[in-house]
Amino acid sequence: MTAPRPAKDAARAQARAARDAIADSLRPLAAAGVRDRFMADVAGTAGSGAGINLPEGPIAGYWPLGSELDVRPLLLHLRSFGRPVALPVSGPRGQALTFRAWDPAVPLAAGRYGIHEPAADCPEVVPAVLLVPLLAFDRTGHRLGYGAGYYDRTLDALRAVRPVLAVGVAFAAQEVDAVPCADHDERLDWIVTEQESLRISQ
């Protein structure tokens, strides 16, 4: 069943307002909470050096835009374990994202929408784990995105080649009872907030 466009647009406006309303003072605490919960629940370690139980391969996140949850503390922590990390490179609207390796010591370039991304000379990678931003989520693993369909197309393309672990990262305040869904919407495998980790049964 496909959700009517007006229903999604209204849900996006409401979700964006809720996320924007989160106090600035709480945002670094939430980012640290997501890092710790991901490491304990998804990666299977509290970060004590016992190893990481994640699929082999690069872990891709995103550079936070506006009021998005800052996933960089988690990416940097994963990198400290020797895991390669990556950021997305946005191409034309309607196409899947590509990803390039991220080295925090190397300056970033301004991408298509002014978002920081690795420069063209950084190696392109195919992520095994994808940290996904969102406007809203529900407990069935559905996410509300921004309407361009980048992540749905990206997950569809990646999953057609090999399994990829898709982890939605968000503030707990972004949860809703039910996300308006369309037939092409890709579900997440996990959702991690500063308050809990949800493993989604597919």
Image: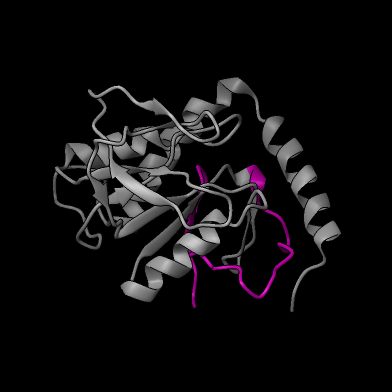
Figure check: 119 above or below 189: above
Specify the color scheme. Answer: one colour
Q: Is-magenta flag for residue 190?
A: yes
Figure check: 64 above or below 93: above
Count the labels in the image.
0
Q: Residue at x 44, y 56 (%)?
A: 167
Front-most of residues 154 and 64: 154
Span colored in magenta:
173-202
Q: Quadrant of the N terminus?
A: bottom right
Tell me which corner region of the image, top left, top right, bottom left or bottom right, holds residue 73. Answer: top left
Figure check: 30 above or below 23: below
Is there any visible trace of residue 189 in the rendered image? Answer: no
Dominant secondary structure of the magenta stretch?
Answer: loop
Q: Is residue 127 left or right of residue 155?
A: left
Q: Position of residue 59 (x, y in %)?
A: 30, 50
Q: Residue at x 33, y 57 (%)?
A: 129
Q: Position of residue 162 (x, y in %)?
A: 31, 73
Q: Position of residue 190 (x, y in %)?
A: 46, 61
Is there any visible trace of residue 23 in the rendered image? Answer: yes
Tell me which corner region of the image, top left, top right, bottom left or bottom right, holds residue 171. Answer: top right
Q: Is-magenta flag for residue 28?
A: no
Q: Position of residue 117 (x, y in %)?
A: 39, 34
